[in-house]
Structures are given as structure tokens and as C-alpha cells.
Image (spheres, rainbow, N blue to C red):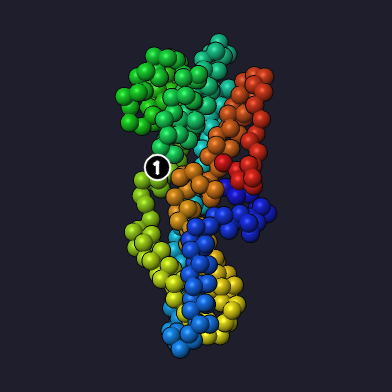
């Protein structure tokens, strides 16, 4: 996630560098051709203006839909933070005093869960994160599981239900938190597994690139030698809107516009280890080149 105040023009230029460079080269070719033989290039201005207006409306609508997905993902990630903290606090309240060691184990399991969830959402193998946080036998068992974070959460629920003699009221409190964690995970999986409709993904790209190819043809008669500046500048705006919309539509794809899964997971881990009173030495993650991962 690009942190506020750090989205500089240079970063955006690198973000759409290749298509922008190709557009600039095309603008120069059209400009040189017009200066050499102006009668070869005649293009009515009005259709291009109407085409551009339609593309801007289309991109704005698509990006609004993409941002709604991104914001829902960030809201669900915030729910994981809140319910993880609540889980650690509830264990300290509802578990008997003699179950202190088991409470610590369950909290460490929650740390393993959020790391497994992060890797699961990014479709990365979680084993390096889990082998230091879970028993070796459980990690080996998880190798054959399709949904690793769900399996970890289910095992946590089994431990609480079978290894602790809790009354129904206390069990219901913890079960509510585990259910909300599962609901938030399911919501994030729904976003990850349900791509934005293909019409929103393909047509904006096709129409935007077509418009960028036509743009210097419509501007060259007015701008002359300044056509590459005007055409590339407007093309840069459209290409940046197109690329940003593509990225925020997939908020777990590990791009600069993603939700900051790694940073949030580290925050949860620090909070849970602090609840144990451990001297863990972990620090919150800081942005790298203006991006918080």
C-alpha cells in the first residue's frame, strides 16, 4: 500500500513505464510524419473528444467498483486484527488460572493462524512461517490440507472444547470470536477467488490503448511539435488510472496498491506477544520506498 503523501510523479511514471514509453514513441512518429507531410494526417476532433469522455466515465466507474473491493478487503483485515486481540483478552478472562500454559499455547497458535492466512491469501507456501510456530507433527499434517488457516483455527477450537472444562457460557464467548475470525477469512477468500468481471478487466484496457493510439492523430494539427507533450501527458493519466484499477481490484496480489497484509500481520503478532509478556524484540514494519507491504 502506498502511504499517504508518498505517491510522487516519478513513482507513477515507473508504474506505467513501458506502455507510456511506447506511447511517447508513437507520438513522436505521428508528429514527425505530420511535419513532413501534413496533408497525410487529417482527423476530426469531435469524435475523439466524445471517445475520450466515454473512456474516462468507464474507467471511473470501473475504478470505483475496484476500490469497493479494496476497501472491503481492508475492512475485513481490520476485523482480523480486532478479533485476534479479543481472542487473546478473552482467553485471559475465561480460562482458569491453572491453564496459563495452555493460554500461551493458544495465543501462539493465533499468531501462526494470521501468518498462515497472509500466505494463503497471497497464494504462497506458509511452511517457513509455521514450522517455528506449530508442532512439527501438526505442520506435517497440514501438508495435506487445502485450507491451512481454517485447519489451524479448527484445531484451536478442538483444543478449547476438549482440553478445557469450560461451561457453556464461557465456551460461547470464545466460539463467537472464532466464528467472527472465520467469517472475516471467508470474506477475504471470496474477494480473492471472485475476480472482477471480465468486461471490467478487458474492455477498459482495449479502449484505453485504442484511444491513446488515436490521441496524437487528433492533437497534432493543433499542437504541432508539442504533440508528444500533450498526448503523452494525457495518455499517462489514462494509463495510470487503468493500472491502478487493475491492481486495487485484486487487493491480495502483492502489488504496491495492495492492502498491507505483512505489516498488519506483524502488528497482530506484536500485540499478541505483548499480551504474553514476552520480550520478543519485534518492531512494526516501516514503508519501503513509500510502500507499506
Q: Position of residue 184 (x, y in %)?
A: 45, 41
Above/below status of 45 relative to 172? below
Res. 74 in view: no
Q: Out of 257 and 76, give the one closest to the viewer.
A: 257
Image quarter (top left, top right, bottom left or bottom right) of the C terminus: top right
Q: Position of residue 242 (x, y in %)?
A: 47, 62
Q: Out of 227 and 284, give the one closest to the viewer.
A: 227
Task: Tell me the quarter of the picture where residue 233 sits.
Answer: bottom right
Residue in the picture at 34% in, 59% down:
198
Residue in the picture at 55% in, 69% down:
232
Above/below status of 228 relative to 291? below
- Please state if 145 lies on the left or on the right of 281 as rendered: left
Q: Position of residue 74 (x, y in %)?
A: 52, 47
Q: Position of residue 203 (x, y in %)?
A: 37, 65
Res. 133 in view: yes
Above/below status of 25 relative to 127? below
- Please state if 24 lies on the left or on the right of 157 as rendered: right
Residue in the picture at 47% in, 53% down:
247
Residue in the picture at 63% in, 56% down:
10
Helix or strand or loop: what does disc 1 sit on?
A: helix
Q: Which residue is mark 1?
A: 189
Q: Out of 165 and 32, give the one closest to the viewer.
A: 32
Above/below status of 80 relative to 51? above
Residue sitting farthest toward the front? 36
Amino acid at each position: 500500500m502506498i502511504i499517504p503523501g508518498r505517491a510522487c510523479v516519478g513513482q507513477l511514471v515507473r508504474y506505467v513505464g513501458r506502455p507510456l514509453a511506447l506511447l511517447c514513441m508513437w507520438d513522436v512518429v505521428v508528429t514527425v510524419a505530420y511535419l513532413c507531410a501534413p496533408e497525410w494526417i487529417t482527423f476530426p476532433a469531435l469524435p475523439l473528444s466524445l471517445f475520450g469522455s466515454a473512456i474516462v466515465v468507464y474507467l471511473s466507474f470501473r475504478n470505483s467498483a475496484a476500490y469497493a473491493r479494496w476497501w472491503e478487503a481492508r475492512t475485513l483485515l481490520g476485523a482480523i486484527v480486532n478479533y485476534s486481540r479479543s481472542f487473546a483478552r478473552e482467553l485471559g478472562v475465561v480460562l482458569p488460572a491453572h491453564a496459563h500454559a495452555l493460554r500461551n499455547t493458544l495465543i501462539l497458535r493465533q499468531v501462526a493462524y494470521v501468518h498462515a492466512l497472509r500466505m494463503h491469501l497471497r497464494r504462497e507456501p506458509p511452511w517457513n512461517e509455521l514450522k517455528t510456530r506449530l508442532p512439527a507433527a501438526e505442520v506435517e499434517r497440514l501438508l495435506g490440507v487445502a485450507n491451512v488457516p481454517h485447519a489451524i483455527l479448527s484445531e484451536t477450537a478442538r483444543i478449547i472444547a476438549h482440553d478445557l472444562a469450560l461451561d457453556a457460557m464461557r465456551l460461547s464467548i470464545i466460539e463467537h470470536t472464532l466464528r467472527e475470525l472465520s467469517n472475516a477469512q471467508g470474506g477475504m477468500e471470496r474477494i480473492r477467488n471472485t475476480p472482477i468481471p471480465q468486461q471490467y478487466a478487458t474492455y477498459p484496457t482495449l479502449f484505453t490503448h485504442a484511444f491513446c493510439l488515436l490521441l496524437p492523430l487528433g492533437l497534432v494539427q493543433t499542437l504541432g511539435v508539442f504533440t508528444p507533450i500533450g498526448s503523452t501527458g494525457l495518455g499517462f493519466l489514462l494509463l495510470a488510472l487503468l493500472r491502478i484499477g487493475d491492481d486495487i481490484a485484486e487487493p491480495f496480489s502483492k502489488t504496491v496498491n495492495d492492502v498491507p497484509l505483512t505489516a498488519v500481520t506483524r502488528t497482530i503478532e506484536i500485540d499478541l506477544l505483548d499480551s504474553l509478556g514476552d520480550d520478543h524484540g519485534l518492531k512494526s514494519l516501516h514503508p519501503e520506498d513509500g510502500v507499506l507491504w
